[in-house]
Amino acid sequence: MQRENTERRLLRSLQVSNASDAVGREFIDSSIAIIAISLLGFSTTQIGILDFLESGAALFLALPIGLLVDHYRPQTILTISLALKVLLGTLLCLGLTFELTSPVFFMPLVFFLGLSVIASENAQTSLVPFVAGSSGQIETAISRMAMADSIAGVIAPAAAGFTLAFLGPTPATGAAALFFVLALVFAWRTMQRLTQMNSTTHHASAPHVADDRSDESQLENDTRTLSQKLTDGFRILGRNRFLFGAVCLISAGNIGLALGDSMVNVVILRVLDLGMPFFGILGTVSAIAGILAASLAPAIVKSLPVRTLYISSSIIQALVACLPLLALMTPNWAHVLFLIQSACWAFTLTVANIAGFSYIAKVVDKKFLGRASAAMRMLTMGTVPFAALLGGVLADIGAITVPLIVWPLLTATAVTVYIFLTRPAASGRA
């Protein structure tokens, strides 16, 4: 009973930390996007460069971060990454206060912000099996984290838009830093409680704690080369047909999303001039859809095979990706079309992500989970920086409609490839 109470407190602390982190990310991401596009007038190429730098951590540093998560435990890396976010939020707030508004100031800041996001997300995913009492609770824990993430995001996007519109950029970025501080406090509490729980159970000679200590010894005594350790995640993904197919699906879909997503912000804020408050409202609509998706996800995941979920959600996303282009062609319907796009995209993406994270957390040994998650993130997000940069360049030298056309085409291609790759896997429910 005492251990169950401790596990519940651990999950609550992790959920509060995750939710606070989500609010901080929404504030700082929305602030940077609005400041760069509307207040500073960055070109689409410069916006693409910022997206490239923020996403570049997934390509260049995902594998080392995954190895660090496995070696030093996810709770430690989570605490360090949140401390870095506090520092970056504070620097951005001070920079705007002293009018440091050149792209040179924003570029390293968004790179390290991307680095901290990669580290914290990997650590949060890898931490779930350590705080969940059994493998059956992993799915529920991830769903609750996603719901807390979405609930926290309801207020943040709209609040960021209104704060920037009426109070200026400094209060918005200052609020982001404060939420990162709150996330850090609860992450620290999670780390302390987990250490205390393991220490107490170790004195009681619990078998699973002995296994954890054995895992630590195996990591420390692993004499393989660094390259072999870093590529463990790729070998795990390659041996699982569903994971490999999911990587191909998400990778191709993310390329299209990266090409078009930044340009959608430009269309909303600059081309159609729908306003900063509406930009924030779209984020709130996405968060509300995410809450609904997270609340329904456990029942949906239990009733449908994961493969079916991925295929159906990707088909919907391919159709929804056409709406920004349609909004550009029919400005009178732009508000409605963007609201539909935000809601549908957030709902399908949340359900698919919960299904995927639950699956990988169940089938992968937790001592390799950091590396497996890192490999999956590197393959799925590694192309995003180049696609984001290409989207900005295509819009500058061609037309803003070019990346908006490529986006749904690539998403449709992605689901076709996924169906082909996973077709022989008649393994029923993945």
Image: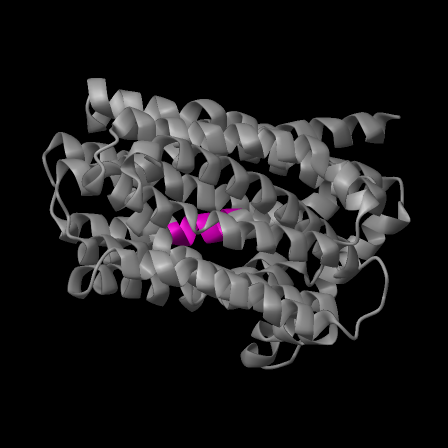
Expressed as whole percent of the image width and height from the top left, the position of residue 124 reads 59, 45
- Magenta-drawn stretch contains 402: no
| Front-lying residue, 209 or 353 | 353
| Front-lying residue, 262 or 89 | 262
- Magenta-drawn stretch contains 119: yes
Expressed as whole percent of the image width and height from the top left, the position of residue 325 reads 35, 50
| 181 w.r.t. 32: above or below | above
| 110 w.r.t. 167: above or below | below
Expressed as whole percent of the image width and height from the top left, the position of residue 148 reads 59, 29
Expressed as whole percent of the image width and height from the top left, the position of residue 12 reads 66, 27
Relative placement, left or right, of 190 versus 38 is right
Residue 57 seen in render = no
Residue 92 seen in render = yes
Name the residue rendered at 53%, 51% in the picture. Answer: 317
Name the image quarter holding residue 187. top right
Name the residue rendered at 52%, 43% in the picture. Answer: 345
Numbered range of the magenta stretch = 114-120
Colour option used: one colour
Name the residue rendered at 84%, 43% in the picture. Answer: 136
